Amino acid sequence: MSGRANETVTLEEAQPVPRVRTASAHTRDAGEPLRIVTYNIHGAVGTDGKRSAARIAEVIAALNADVVALQEVPLGGAASIDVLRELQDLTGMHAVPGPTLDGPDRRFGNAVLTNLPVLAVRTLDLSFGSREARGALDVDIDTGNGLMRIVATHLGLSARERRAQVRLLLEAFDTPDLPVILLGDLNEWFVWGWPLRALLTRFGRVAAPRTFPSRFPAFALDRVWVHPAARLVDIEVDRSRPARIASDHLPLVARVLR
């Protein structure tokens, strides 16, 4: 198992964040909560078997989100499409890639879309033994009322793997001065499994609407955790018809105080 926290560029010389094509945090009232979304896009392949970044972008635009954590995102390469670039172009939001598979032919993994200034980006390697590479994308966002840390992840399929990954994530949250949002596809099927109990101990109990499979949701695989917990206003799932078709997961939307 490996678990290496790697500091990457702070984006001080990055291009300015593009203007989004829907209402954004820059146009909404400064006292209004941020809309934070986690969304496993399944490679932009919908429940009808068709790949369409445009459908994913349509779902995201309707959510009027300030930050969107994405999982299962094709990030380009010689033999692969770059869905994240398409989503950036279609939504007008700034894109931050977090590949867990990073080869010349194919890049794939997590990502964040946001219309807020990105001040720092880190990655955390959550890979476990010989299983599929996993990781977390750790991004500092300027909310206009201070910094907020967004940790977007996609955990593994085995219970032993998830236990190790949650331990690493909790160890990484040693930042009492920053609000932290952990979100993503936790792949945790067992309601009383150790990973969820450990997260509840750290973050407190939060709503967990069912998000998978998107047509007839039966499992709450996608989660949003906020620390301090008092910043979380509410959590809801997008059950719209476009969302039920665009991916096999439904987007989860949290409103969070700045």
Image (cartoon, grey):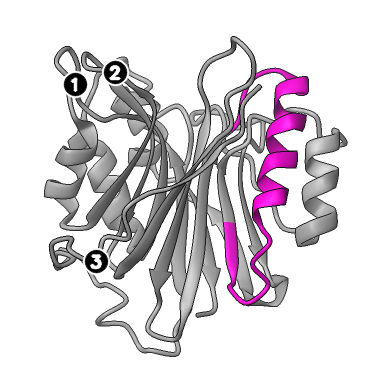
Q: Is label 1 in a helix, a strand or a loop?
A: loop
Give the percent coordinates (x, y) of residue 123.
46, 44
Looking at the image, is mark 2 or mark 1 earlier in the sequence? 1
Q: Residues within 10 Å of mark 1 (few under 14, many from 20)?
A: some
Q: Amino acid at mark 2?
A: Gly
Give the percent coordinates (x, y) of residue 114.
31, 60
Does residue 195 appear to the left or right of 184 in the view shown?
right
Residue beneath disc 3: 12
Badge 2 vs badge 1, beta-carbon distance below 8 Å: yes
State the CA–CA distance, disc 2 to disc 1.
7 Å
Residue drawn at x 19%, y 53% is: 91
Q: Is label 2 in a helix, a strand or a loop?
A: loop
Between 48 and 70, the one nearer to me in the picture:
70
Which is in the foreground here, disc 3 or disc 1?
3
Does residue 31 appear to the left or right of 189 in the view shown?
left
Which is in the foreground here, disc 2 or disc 1?
2
Q: Is residue 179 above or below residue 31?
A: above
Q: Is residue 202 above or below residue 186?
A: below
State the CA–CA distance, disc 3 to disc 1.
25 Å
Residue beneath disc 2: 103
Q: Is residue 209 above or below residue 25?
A: above
Residue beneath disc 1: 77
State the CA–CA distance, disc 3 to disc 2.
26 Å
Q: In the picture, residue 154 is in which quadrant?
A: top right
Q: Is label 3 in a helix, a strand or a loop?
A: loop
Give the percent coordinates (x, y) of residue 237.
53, 50
Residue drawn at x 51%, y 64% is: 149
Looking at the image, is mark 3 or mark 1 earlier in the sequence? 3
Segment colored magenta: 155-181
Residue drawn at x 46%, y 61% is: 36
Mark seen at residue 105: none
Q: Amino acid at mark 3?
A: Glu
